[in-house]
Amino acid sequence: MISREVVLHTLKCSPNQYPRALEEKYPHVLEKIVQLWNSRDAEAYFSDLLNPNFSGGRFDRLGFPKPVWHEILQLSELYRKPRSKK
């Protein structure tokens, strides 16, 4: 299980942006997002999460409950924001 501090630090999000529903219902998805956060693979993962029946012709998932989907969308938007490269 990934810690709240690691999520906040890696994603550089504020506590009010913390994906609580995602952590509660799909902790493995949140952990994967954190693992991919600084890679190019995160874009494809977000696309697959947000459009499960679109990419690659997959029709094996129904998608996420609305609150979780919205948190994933917010994280996707945060991921796309320009970040300083250290």
Image (tube, helix red, strand yellow):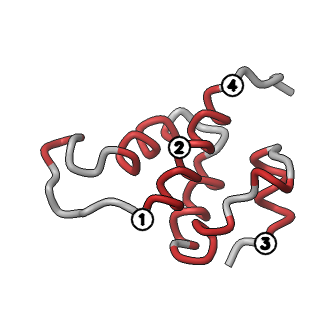
Residue at 32% x, 59% y is 63
- In the rendered image, residue 73, in percent from the top left (x then y), is placed at 53, 43
Q: Secondary structure at mark 3?
A: loop
Question: What amino acid type is highlighted by mark number 4?
Answer: Lys
Are there few (<14), some (14-19), or many (20+) residues within 10 Å of tag 3?
A: few
- In the rendered image, residue 16, in percent from the top left (x then y), is placed at 82, 54
- In the rendered image, residue 23, in percent from the top left (x then y), is placed at 63, 71
Between disc 3 and disc 4, the foreground one is 4
Q: Where is mark 4, residue-wise?
A: 81
Q: Earlier in the sequence, mark 1 or mark 3?
A: 3
Q: Earlier in the sequence, mark 2 or mark 1?
A: 1
Q: Where is mark 3, residue-wise?
A: 3
Q: Where is mark 1, residue-wise?
A: 65
The C terminus lies in quadrant: top right
Question: What amino acid type is highlighted by mark number 1?
Answer: Pro
Residue at 59% x, 62% y is 30
Question: What amino acid type is highlighted by mark number 2?
Answer: Leu
Asked if marks 3 and 4 touch (Cβ < 8 Å), the reply is no
Q: Nearer the viewer, residue 7 or 23?
A: 23
Q: Earlier in the sequence, mark 4 or mark 1?
A: 1
Which numbered dot is residue 73?
A: 2
Are there few (<14), some (14-19), or many (20+) residues within 10 Å of tag 2?
A: some
Q: Nearer the viewer, residue 71 or 30?
A: 71
Q: Secondary structure at mark 4?
A: loop
Q: Earlier in the sequence, mark 3 or mark 4?
A: 3
Using the image, determine if residue 38 lies above or below residue 68: above
Q: Quadrant of residue 59?
A: bottom left
Q: On the picture, is 12 further left or further right than 24?
A: right
